[in-house]
Amino acid sequence: MAASCGNKCVKSIFWLLNFLFFILGAVILGLSLWIRFDQSTVSKLAQSVNIDLNIVPMDTYFACVLVLLIIEIVAIVLYFVNKTNLRDMFYSVWKTELIGKYSSYQPIKDAVDKIQTGLHCCGATGCTDWTLTGSLPPSSCTSCSPSMTGCAELIWNVLEENLVYVIIALAIILIIEVFALIFGCIVISGIKEKRASE
């Protein structure tokens, strides 16, 4: 019952966020069309508030990219500092949420069975995870031997093995964002120089 309530709550929040993004998109579209077709009102507004319309969007863009860059760098540092804690948390969540609720919630049972059958693994760290919950390993555990790899271990190891590709992708994204910041600074300083010379 609690899981279905949580599922409904997540769906409602997801729908609400999508609706808010839709409304914000409609507002941005409306303002863009208004600015495009009614230059006189916009220029009067800019003069009365003393806003330079060319710099404000560039400053906003620069700030957004800078915040995004900082968040990404902090996330990368936190990953490497807390890697073992993240791994242990991943294993723990697998045991409590997937193995612990296996027999009481059908969607979890279906998902775990598909994972265990498809990846040829059992439990989070091995077959013993099932005996700790007081139940026998399900039939989706193809073989239950002490050498059987756990699903959480297998997934974590695949992520670790492919970490080089993830790091390369992140590095490319970070380089693009740094260039975006540099070009943004160049454009902003060019606009300010042009305004100063007028």
Image (cartoon, rainbow, N blue to C red):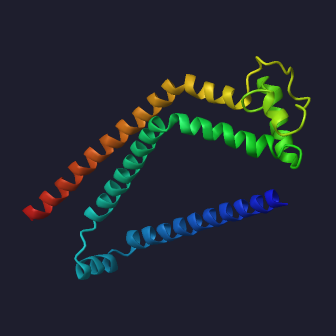
Q: Quadrant of residue 158?
A: top right
Q: Is residue 54 visible?
A: no
Q: Is residue 52 left or right of residue 4?
A: left
30 lies above or below 69:
below
Q: Residue at x 83, y 34 (%)?
A: 130
Q: Position of residue 77 (x, y in %)?
A: 41, 39
Residue farthest along the left direction in this orientation: 197
53 lies above or below 65:
below
Q: Nearer the viewer, residue 152 or 44?
A: 152
Q: Position of residue 192 (x, y in %)?
A: 16, 60
Q: Position of residue 53 (x, y in %)?
A: 28, 67
Q: Is residue 176 left or right of residue 10?
A: left
Q: Nearer the viewer, residue 9 or 42?
A: 9
Q: Residue at x 44, y 71 (%)?
A: 31
Q: Nearer the viewer, residue 73 or 198?
A: 73
What quarter of the picture does the N terminus occupy?
Answer: bottom right
What quarter of the picture does the C terminus occupy?
Answer: bottom left
Q: Position of residue 69 (x, y in %)?
A: 38, 46
Q: Nearer the viewer, residue 85 or 27?
A: 85
Q: Quadrant of residue 162?
A: top right
157 lies above or below 47:
above
51 lies above or below 65:
below
Tally of numbered tags: 0
Q: Residue at x 90, y 33 (%)?
A: 136
Q: Residue at x 78, y 33 (%)?
A: 129
Q: Quadrant of residue 116?
A: top right
Q: Is residue 168 visible?
A: yes
